[in-house]
């Protein structure tokens, strides 16, 4: 098995190292990761400046590894198009420190790494632990290995990636595995307005979870109840129901004579 | 009607100015746009540094306008949470120079501006013209006005935004309006490897459209045939079919005794 691993916390992240350690005994492991933290980058890709990659060592590992000046999506593209000797069987992004859930997915650098893998047609998984404080990666890393085995056995549809969130709990407190939906909860909801020493205003974007109920079967519901949440995500964002409705609007474009 | 306009080409873009001009006669127009180009930023949001907004003038316009050091998503959040006196009826992002189609949508700063509007629960539209060379904005701006009228009349489902691409053609060459699906075509597919004057390797990400057929009814199909393409996009990226299939995998997590 050939594995390409990236993340958005950067090459120095302990979550990345834990994932590499878990996969080194399973297959040939390649790491292409940002040289610095690239959180909340969304699915940014670098078209306006040159990308560079330099060989690095992942502590405690003999994996082939590169650090780049790019985003997680750039790292996957560099790995696929240049750095790896052959196509990987799976792309992994993580292990992220902190959850990636609900409407936050589109902001997530971790998810965007897996999204880029899926765009290249490779089964891809984003993996996060549910806590920013004292995260432990053992369970997430071991579950990632199990999940990859299941994917290689059963197959994933093209255009599908998996978004995994693992509760930051002791093994005996894990409730199980739930295949979930993306919740409609939103987190960025508030600005803090401050004044700098020169008297100029600046803002911090922040937020609290929006008061949307954690519906049963959603990612936020599962994680808060101690389940490992696995959400299949599709690259095809077409809203079919809205498309059907809009066809009856009979939108037309007829140029006015004076245009 | 109260309109919030952003883009990813930056406050100085002629495409933005054309959109502002078209809406000034229709309603109260507010502009919050990046002070510099922020293309291919994906749905990045700025959490790690302060945001700033300063009042600017949009040439030929009396719209309330701010330039920010943020991404398109930041601009919409700043507008919604701080700068606008009240909630807008619609969020517009564009007019982008160059198309936003198929698998490129998730990279697009233009689309991410509209995505942020939809996350805030406001009907939102991303608008692009289909050519990087000699773009004309008249038709796109006029169609945006018509489309906003239709949205306010018929309503859009929550969690839905619209992605509009207008062919860069003379009015009489426009074939009509097509409600489309996102094509599976991919554009970032190639690296150019170069060597800098110091002998170090660097890369440019680039690409050609992947050899996927432009299926009838897709965004790439419609634009290449002279139609204005309108694709409804959902914020809910859950892959329901994959979720159903995966439930039969019976994934479990049982901690080993030695963990």
Image (cartoon, coloured by chain):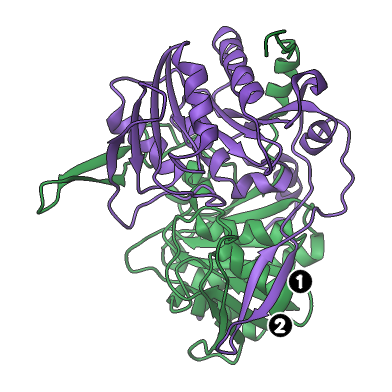
Chain colours: A purple, B green
Q: Residue at x 37, y 22 (%)?
A: A63
Query: How far apart, in angstroms, are the residues tagged by discs 2 and 1?
Result: 10 Å
Q: Residues within 10 Å of mark 2 (few under 14, many from 20)?
A: few
Nearer to us: label 2 or label 1: 1
Circles 2, 1 touching at the beta carbon (< 8 Å): yes
The quadrant holding residue A134 is top right
Rendered view: A156 above or below A10: above
Q: Chain of mark 1?
A: B
Residue B27's label in the rendered image is: 2
Residue B89's label in the rendered image is: 1
Residue B91 vs residue A104, the one in the foreground: A104
Q: Chain of mark 2?
A: B
Rendered view: A36 above or below A65: below
Residue A159 vs residue B41, the one in the foreground: B41
Quadrant containing the N terminus of chain A is top left
Residue A76 vs residue A15, the one in the foreground: A15
Query: Quick one: label 2 or label 1, which is nearer the N terminus?
Result: 2
């Amino acid at each position: 098995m050939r594995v390409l691993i990236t993340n958005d916390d950067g090459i120095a992240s302990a979550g990345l190292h834990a994932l590499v350690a878990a996969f080194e005994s399973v297959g040939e492991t390649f790491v292409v990761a940002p040289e610095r933290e690239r959180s909340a980058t969304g699915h940014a890709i670098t078209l306006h400046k040159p990308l560079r990659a330099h060989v690095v060592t992942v502590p405690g590992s003999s994996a082939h590894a590169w650090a780049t000046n790019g985003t997680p999506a750039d790292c996957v593209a560099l790995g696929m198009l240049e750095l790896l000797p052959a196509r990987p069987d799976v792309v992994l992004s993580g292990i992220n420190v902190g959850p990636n859930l609900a409407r936050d997915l589109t902001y997530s650098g971790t998810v965007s790494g897996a999204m880029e893998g899926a765009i290249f047609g490779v089964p891809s998984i984003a993996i996060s632990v549910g806590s920013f404080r004292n995260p432990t990666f053992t369970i997430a890393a071991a579950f990632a290995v199990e999940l990859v085995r299941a994917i290689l056995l059963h197959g994933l549809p093209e255009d599908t990636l998996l978004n995994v969130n693992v509760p930051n709990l002791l093994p005996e407190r894990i409730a199980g595995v739930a295949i979930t939906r993306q919740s409609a909860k939103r987190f960025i909801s508030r600005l803090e307005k401050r004044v700098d020493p020169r008297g100029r205003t600046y803002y911090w974007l922040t937020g609290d979870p929006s008061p949307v109920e954690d519906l049963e079967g959603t990612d936020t519901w599962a994680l808060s109840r101690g389940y490992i949440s696995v959400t299949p995500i599709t690259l095809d964002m077409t809203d079919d129901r809205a498309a059907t409705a809009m066809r009856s609007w009979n939108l037309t474009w007829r140029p006015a004579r004076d245009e």
